[in-house]
Image (tube, rainbow, N blue to C red):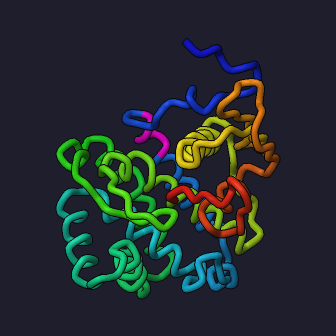
């Protein structure tokens, strides 16, 4: 039996997986926070470029709405995935899916986009929590230059919430708006990212993440030996998502 984590220091092996009903709560909270941030923007801010090169804030919001509405029922999910697969050809299906979402929602005025997002957020969270039939289904994705096979459970419980969270970061980064962060919500998401990042590279480290979503994490020797990293928690996630350049262990990407 391994020794417990030191006070204030979490070993990545002790970070629990995210699954229903917790995943439902996290998903609903995240879409609500995204809606609140978008609802506060002025006309100029909707036109700001984001860290997603092809999208300004308005296009990014169209993607988020599309991803939110697209996972509110099996029919919606299947329809979207079939259309994206046809469009993708030999390319990545996820790129085709997001492009279709942006195009589909491009003509919506901002009040209608916000209204639909407010309705779809709770509906998506509930459906993701009870979509038992699709949870075992496989999905192939490319991460760190290699093709991986994920289960839909991972997408439903983890990736969709991370996607909205990272795009909320994108909006705040583009507009200079304050990013609402709490240990209970954002800190939980970040801790789960840290644990997956640790599993992916498998090397010992001592990681100190600053800010409301931060914490201190270790892998390997519980004394904290290994690569020593101190970074803002949000910047850590931006780096692992490929939005900022990472060196050493920070070059290992995690899906968002």
> Range of the magenta residues?
22-26
Q: Quadrant of residue 244?
A: bottom right
Rendering coords of residue 149 (x, y %): 32, 56
The vertical placement of 219 against 46, above or below, is above
Rendering coords of residue 94 (x, y %): 37, 72
Most prominent secondary structure in the magenta stretch? Answer: helix
As rendered, which of 225 and 184 lies closer to the eye?
225
As rendered, which of 5 and 111 lies closer to the eye?
5
* Residue 107 visible in the current orientation: yes
Q: How many marks?
A: 0
The vertical placement of 97 against 231, above or below, is below
The vertical placement of 35 against 122, above or below, is below
Rendering coords of residue 233 (x, y %): 73, 49
Judge left or right: residue 219 versus residue 226.
left
Judge left or right: residue 128 versus residue 234.
left
As rendered, which of 208 and 165 lies closer to the eye?
208
Residue at 62%, 67% (x, y): give it: 242
Residue at 54%, 61% (x, y): give it: 35
* Quadrant of the image containing the N terminus: top right
Q: Quadrant of residue 74?
A: bottom left
Judge left or right: residue 84 versus residue 141.
left
196 is within the stretch colored magenta:
no
């Amino acid at each position: 039996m391994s020794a417990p984590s030191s006070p204030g220091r979490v070993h990545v092996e002790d970070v629990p997986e995210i699954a229903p009903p917790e995943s439902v709560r996290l998903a609903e909270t995240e879409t609500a926070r995204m809606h609140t941030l978008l609802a506060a923007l002025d006309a100029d801010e909707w036109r700001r470029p984001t860290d997603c090169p092809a999208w300004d804030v308005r296009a990014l919001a169209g993607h988020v709405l599309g991803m939110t509405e697209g996972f509110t029922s099996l029919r919606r999910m299947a329809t979207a995935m079939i259309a994206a697969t046809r469009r993708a050809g030999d390319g990545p299906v996820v790129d085709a899916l997001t492009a279709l979402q942006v195009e589909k929602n491009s003509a919506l005025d901002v009040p209608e986009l916000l209204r639909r997002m407010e309705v779809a957020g709770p509906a998506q969270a509930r459906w993701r929590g009870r979509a038992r039939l699709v949870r075992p289904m496989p999905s192939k994705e490319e991460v760190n230059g290699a093709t991986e096979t994920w289960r839909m459970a991972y997408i439903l419980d983890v990736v969709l919430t991370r996607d909205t969270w990272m795009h909320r970061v994108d909006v705040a980064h583009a507009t200079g708006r304050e990013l609402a962060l709490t240990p209970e919500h954002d800190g939980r998401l970040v801790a789960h990212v840290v644990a997956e990042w640790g599993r992916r590279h498998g090397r010992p480290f001592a990681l100190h993440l600053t800010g409301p979503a931060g914490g201190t994490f270790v892998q390997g020797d519980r004394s904290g030996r290994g690569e020593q990293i101190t970074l803002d928690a949000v910047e850590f996630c931006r780096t692992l998502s490929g939005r900022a350049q990472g060196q050493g262990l920070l070059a290992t990407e995690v899906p968002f």
